[in-house]
């Protein structure tokens, strides 16, 4: 008989460690007014479920959808050395129609 594989559960990050900062840009403000979507920089190891839980817990809102993007670092030069900026993870969160987040 086939043995069942053990499911190893990763430790969950606390809500305040999942969301690093909100991304306040022109495009982000346009999305928030038109589509009720907000962008955040999130922890690299955070999953969509982690982001959903953190936003609902920190801002007391109801989340409809979460989309994530892994952003690559950009190449940079300093004097004669080549380098690269750090990669980061972006989450775009769509809220329920009745809910809003006010950053200002």
Image (cartoon, grey):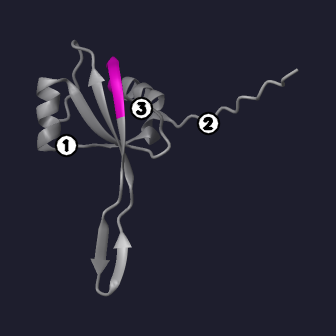
The residue identified by callout 2 is 11
Measured from the top left, where is residue 70 in percent x and y?
38, 46
Density class for disc 3 (Cα within 10 Å; few <14, some 14-19, many ≥20) is many
**Quadrant in the rendering for residue 91:** top left
Residue 7 position within the rendered picture, expressed as x and y whole percent measured from the top left? 71, 29
**Residue to which mark 1 is pinned:** 24
Tally of marks = 3
| Residue at the (24%, 43%) spot, across then down | 23
Q: Position of residue 92 (x, y in %)?
A: 29, 33
Measure how far apart labels 3 and 1 are at the Cα level: 17 Å
For marks 2 and 1, give the CA distance: 30 Å
Q: In this orientation, does residue 22 appear?
A: yes
Give the structural element (helix, strand or loop) at label 1: loop
What is the distance, in whole Å, between disc 3 and disc 2 at their CAs? 14 Å
Residue 98 sits in quarter: top left
Q: Mark 3 or 1 closer to N-term?
A: 1
* Nearer the observer, 29 or 102: 29
Q: Residue furthest top?
A: 98
Of the numbered discs 3 and 2, the one sitting upstream in the chain is 2
* Residue 103 shown left or right of residue 76 in the figure: left
- The residue under label 3 is 51
Left or right? Give the position of 15 relative to 27: right
């Amino acid at each position: 008989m086939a043995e069942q594989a053990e499911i190893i559960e990763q430790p969950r990050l606390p809500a305040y460690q999942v969301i690093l900062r909100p991304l306040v840009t022109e495009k982000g403000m346009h999305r928030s007014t038109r589509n009720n979507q907000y962008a955040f920089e999130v922890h690299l190891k955070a999953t969509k479920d982690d982001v959903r839980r953190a936003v609902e817990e920190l801002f007391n809102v109801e989340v409809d959808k979460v989309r994530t993007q892994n952003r690559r670092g950009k190449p940079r030069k300093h004097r004669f050395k080549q380098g690269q900026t750090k990669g980061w993870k972006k989450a775009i969160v769509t809220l329920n129609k009745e809910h809003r987040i006010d950053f200002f």
